[in-house]
Image (cartoon, rainbow, N blue to C red):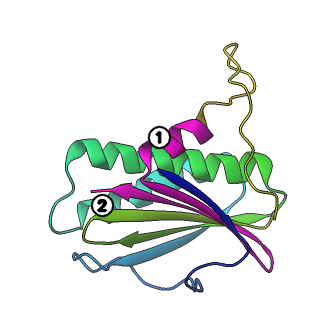
Amino acid sequence: MEDDYSSTMSAARTVTGTGESDEAGASWSLVLPARSAAAPEARRAARRFVRRLAPRVVDRVAQDIDLVVTELVTNAVRHARGATCTLILDARPDAVEVTVVDEDPTPPRPHAPDFSGCLGGFGWPMVRRLARQVTVALIPDGKAVCALVPR
């Protein structure tokens, strides 16, 4: 797995697509208000997206995608200073790209896990472990965190 902190996105992101395609190459996006219900809503949307893909995504990979979506959206809600975040899912033949765009240009920073359960610290390392590649791109109005989860 590789971390790449870059100042521009490799492909300009436009929030388009319906997620209706069931093939690799499908793209889907959802703008979420930055509130506690965003992560469960994003998880439900990601599950619908993954169920529509062909070839079928195996259960273990679907669970990995679920965890990555949950953690990235949760981090955007907890740490970014914006009113919304956007979840973008792109299916590739060998991976599902999970991107969360938020309005805060500050890159994620790992911190020591809090075993008391109050402060977290487990999500970012988990995303980095589950993804083949994680990139953080600074964009004009914030950042985009992208995790490539292998199929």
Magenta residues?
124-151
Residue 139: x %, y % from top left: 74, 77
Q: In the rendered view of the protein, which quadrant contains the C terminus?
A: bottom left
Classify residue 31 by image quadrant.
bottom right
Residue depicted at 79% across the width and 55% down the height:
80
Left/right of residue 18 with respect to residue 79 in the rendered view? left
Residue depicted at 19% across the width and 49% down the height:
58
**Closest to the observer, 30 or 62:** 62
Q: Is residue 8 above or below residue 55?
A: below
Classify residue 54 by image quadrant.
bottom left
Residue under numbered circle 1: 129
Q: Amino acid at mark 1?
A: Arg
Residue reaching furthest left? Answer: 55
Classify residue 53 by image quadrant.
bottom left
Give the mark, 1 or 2, whose residue is nearer the N terminus.
2
Residue under numbered circle 2: 50
Residue 51: x %, y % from top left: 25, 60
